[in-house]
Image (spheres, rainbow, N blue to C red):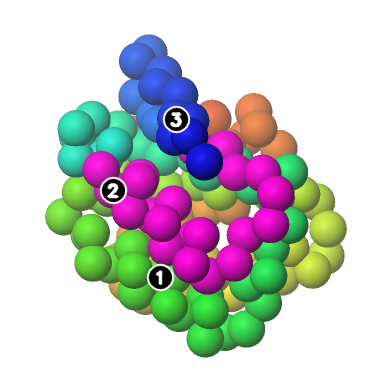
Amino acid sequence: MPLCIKFYKDQDFIQKTETGEIDCGRAINTIYELSAAAEVYKGYSILMDVRDAASQLSSMGDLLTLSTEFAKYKNVFTNKIAMLLPDTQERVERANRFKACMVVNGFQFEYFTDYDRAVAWLSEAS
């Protein structure tokens, strides 16, 4: 799968869009890709767009694994991380649990179902 990351210089954020089926292994690979981009573009916030991706990540263990994976790269994920997801009860509940994991690990993390709100949050001063 080719790496597809967009860089927005004016808003200072990196967007990563995922489609298809996401399992724990693919999610860990995505975190690694984002960490590599964040290392190069220091100071940029991150927008993960998973609206068109089906997620197999449902257990609390999966969510803890992913937040722990983010924590491995904490030195490069220094700005905000936003996740854009479909507006379904199941995905919002899962995102809320993931947010709790990320906040415990010291990240500025938020999830959104609206692109403009996500960009507005990323653009706000920390």
Residue 114 image position (x, y, % from top left): 71, 37
x, y percent for residue 88: 83, 58
Q: Amino acid at mark 3?
A: Ile
Q: Residues within 10 Å of mark 2 (few under 14, many from 20)?
A: many
Which residue is at a point 34% across and 24% down the rendered structure image?
Answer: 12
Residue at the extreme top of the image, as rendered: 10
Residue position for label 3:
5
Q: Residue furthest front?
A: 1
Q: Measuring 35% from the left and 15% from the top, which residue is drawn there?
A: 9
Q: Residue at x 62, y 83 (%)?
A: 59
Task: Name the residue rendered at 29%, 37% in the picture.
Answer: 37
Judging by the rendered image, the residue that carries numbered circle 1 is 67
- Mark found first going from the N terminus, 3 or 1: 3
Q: Quadrant of residue 60?
A: bottom right
Residue at disc 3, secondary structure:
strand
Alpha-carbon span between mark 3 and mark 1: 21 Å
